[in-house]
Image (cartoon, grey):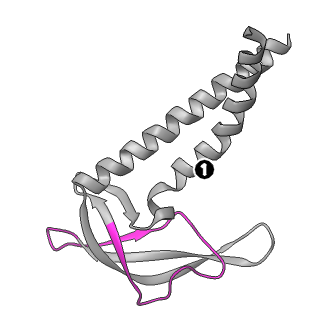
Amino acid sequence: MINYLYWGLFLLGLLLAYFAFRAYTNTVSLMQDGIKTTATVIQMIPVSSSDGGPTYKPVFEFKDRGNTLRTYESSVSSSPPAYQIGQKVNIVYDPKDADEVKTISFWGLYRWTVILLSIASPLLIIGGGYLLYNRI
């Protein structure tokens, strides 16, 4: 019975590591094939947080290759705000997918890779370690 638990932890860790790898490869592809430009922060949207204080989500405005003015609302909010209105920020976007926009920063590019690997690593170590120990 206990073996099933450790197999479950190990398999869940593998699944999360797979999704982390996919997030990483998608980011690498976007950085290679995407179009890099500069965006301007035009608005900070207040978002209520679990601790009661507001966090702020930036909205970016940029021109694409077709000289069309586009906006991008970040999915990440923070307190204090990470950006100020009027600040210039480097971004990369996929010309084939209007919704695929990322800020060019470590956290903006690799956020999901880091989060998923942070969860997968202990699961792989605990589950895999137990399974390897029992094999010897």
33 lies above or below 86 = above
Classify mark 1: residues with Cα within 10 Å, few (<14), some (14-19) or many (20+): few
Q: Name the residue: 85% across, 10% down.
A: 1
Q: Name the residue: 21% across, 69% down.
A: 64
Q: Which amino acid does label 1 sit on?
A: Ile
Residue at which label 1 appears: 115
Image quarter for residue 61? Answer: bottom left
**Front position in the image: 121 or 20:** 121
Quarter of the rendering occupied by the C terminus = top right
In the rendered structure, the answer to whether residue 87 lies left or right of residue 33 reads right
Q: Residue 99: x and y, percent?
A: 36, 56
Q: Is the magenta stretch mostly helix, strand or loop?
A: loop
1 lies above or below 66 = above
Q: Tag 1, which secondary structure?
A: helix
Q: Name the residue: 79% across, 19% down.
A: 5
136 lies above or below 125 = above
Q: Residue 58: x and y, percent?
A: 50, 76
Q: Does the magenta stretch include residue 65?
A: yes
Q: Name the residue: 51% across, 32% down.
A: 18
Image quarter for residue 2? Answer: top right
Q: Give the range drawn in magenta.
A: 64-91
